[in-house]
Image (cartoon, helix red, strand yellow):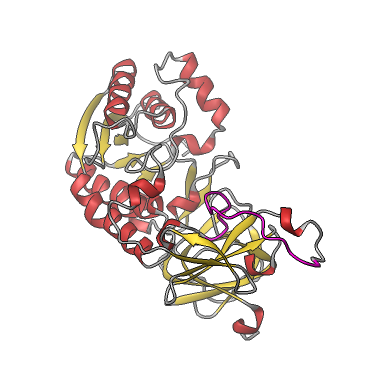
Amino acid sequence: MSQAVKPQRVVVGLSGGVDSAVSAWLLKQQGHEVVGIFMKNWEDDDDSEYCSSNIDFVDAAAVADVIGIEIEHVNFASEYKDRVFAEFLREYQAGRTPNPDVLCNAEIKFKAFLDHAMRLGAERIATGHYARVREQGKQVQLLKGLDPSKDQSYFLHRLNQSQLARTWFPVGELRKTQVRQIATDIGLPNARKKDSTGICFIGERPFREFLSRYISHEPGPIKDDRGRVIGRHVGLSFYTLGQRQGLGIGGVKEKGAQRGGGEHLPWFVAHKDIERNTLYAVQGHGHPWLLAPALCAQDLSWVAGHAPVGDRPMNLGAKTRYRQVDSACRLLGDAEDSLVLEFEQAQWAVTPGQSAVLYDGEVCLGGGVIAQALQTETVGV
């Protein structure tokens, strides 16, 4: 949103963090009528040491006071529990590893929040995400944020044309260091506040402790790539592919190991056998079981409203997890109900439940939920 636009009524999602605070200030400086909304998305354990929503609201209110805008506290906890948390639990129970931030953006921040803002007479909404929007003819494109280390387009890839057409990302044009400096220069009380990590309903509490309250779990064997039992797991839902910590297994000596130092190589989760309630772990970051040259994704969502069509570009990039550099790949199939991505270089720990997000340069095209990792012979190309 670098070009000058006529003043509009903009509702900004104020989270209590510095990014949304600076977003609100930038919009007000541009002459817009700015209203802040603090979204409360979780109520369970809200008074515990792990969930900071009360502190965050105090910070958001202090920011609104400094900027000189109104702020409203809106409770979306019911919508969040129905649309995001319930799906989160279903996925974990099925042995997959979901990304609730992706679903939260599509269902809460850019649906429930957007609808509420429109009822308040807003013409636009704005958030502190590091991403950009660009009008290209009759289409609205979702672009990466200019700070590559903070780009959040991965989490926004399920947004549609209607949502993006009414959304601004003011800090998407800036680097994080610039945002911090602006906050300091204008005296925002949260200028040095640490960035939040994870999702509120887990916070800093031990993940297993939290998840065990909501889903059933049954202990079972941990086996290596030879089928030897090397330990016990506490329930498949508590593990994700590529996980290294918390496996509770020591060094199993690899007689005659060709890779060298086999007994000292770290263990990684490589596979979950749901039917047999068995967890498989392998030694070494480069073990073949951890590498996948292709993947299949379902539950697709395309920013343009349809899959890439016509002369399909062959040099797309894709991320199979956040904070990953784009990996060169080919998009196979019609990409309407499902897609297959074949990568130039095998991807590490491709995890069912996570999102595979496609890019054409800086343009985020959309993506889908990873259903399974594929070997080359499975792809059929």
Outermost bottom residue: 380
Identify the residue at image location x=20%, y=32%. Answer: 73
Of residue 208 and residue 77, the one placed in the foreground of this image is: 208
Q: Which corner quadrant of the image does residue 148 belong to?
A: top right
Residue 325, image x, y percentages: 63, 52
347 is higher (above) or lower (below) than 227 = above
Residue 228, percent across and down?
60, 71
Asked whether the viewer can see residue 135, the reply is no
**Quarter of the figure with residue 62:** top left
Secondary structure of the magenta portion, mostly? loop
Against 271, residue 198 (above or below) is: above
- Is 34 on the left-hand or right-hand side of 358? left
x, y percent for residue 371: 47, 71
163 or 300, which lies in front? Answer: 300
Residue 215 in view here: yes
Residue 128 is situated, as x and y percent measured from the top left of the image, at 42, 36
The residue range painted magenta reads 241-256
Is 254 contained in the magenta span? yes
Q: At 42% from the left edge and 42% from the top edge, which residue is drawn?
A: 198
